[in-house]
């Protein structure tokens, strides 16, 4: 899709849309390839992608984009190069909760006989 001097491109993955813009001097196919590589990198770093995963890992994704792009120009999408620069660790999509101890393996203690 084009609007005035911009091309809008998108890639859909797991119900999520990844969108980029490209000026007339840049091939829209380059932007599509960048988005495909971005999705691959995000899956490598964060696991299966979902809206929740994106939200939990916003700072990591921002850091990845900051290293991948410089003033809107693609610098690198090589995972080996990026791992040297990325400092953040991904946030698990289901963090451990103290409120849900069902998976910890605690011994079940029956209630006192008068409270049944």
Image (cartoon, rainbow, N blue to C red):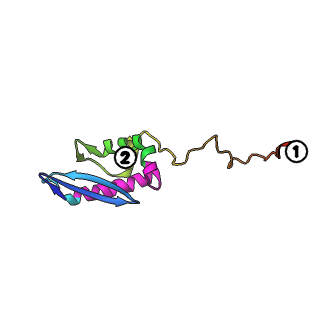
Q: Is residue 63 magenta?
A: no
Q: Residue placed at 16% from the left, 57% from the top?
A: 2
The residue at 24%/57% (across/down) is: 9
In the image, the segment drawn in magenta is: 30-53
Q: Name the mark on residue 113.
A: 1
The residues bearing labels 1 and 2 have C-alpha atoms spaced at a distance of 60 Å
User: Which of 78 and 10 lies nearest the eye of the viewer?
Assistant: 10
Name the residue: 36% across, 44% down. 64
The residue that mark 2 highlights is 82
In the picture, the quarter occupied by the N terminus is bottom left
Q: Would you say 80 lies left or right of 73 here?
A: right
x, y (%) of residue 40? 38, 56
Q: Quadrant of residue 8?
A: bottom left
Disc count in the image?
A: 2
Q: Earlier in the sequence, mark 1 or mark 2?
A: 2
> In this image, 90 relative to 62: left or right?
right
Prevailing secondary structure of the magenta residues: helix
Q: Secondary structure at mark 2?
A: helix
* Label 1 CA crowd tier, 10 Å (few <14, some 14–19, many 20+): few
């Amino acid at each position: 899709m084009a609007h005035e001097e911009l091309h809008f491109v998108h890639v859909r993955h797991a119900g999520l849309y990844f969108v980029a813009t490209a000026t007339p001097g840049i091939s829209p196919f380059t932007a599509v390839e960048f988005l495909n590589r971005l999705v691959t990198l995000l899956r490598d770093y964060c696991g299966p992608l979902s809206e929740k995963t994106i939200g939990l890992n916003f700072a990591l994704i921002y850091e990845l984009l900051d290293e991948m792009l410089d003033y809107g120009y693609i610098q690198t999408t090589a995972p080996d190069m990026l791992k040297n620069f990325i400092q953040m660790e991904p946030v698990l999509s289901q963090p451990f909760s103290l409120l849900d101890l069902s998976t910890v393996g605690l011994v079940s203690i029956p209630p006192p006989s008068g409270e049944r």
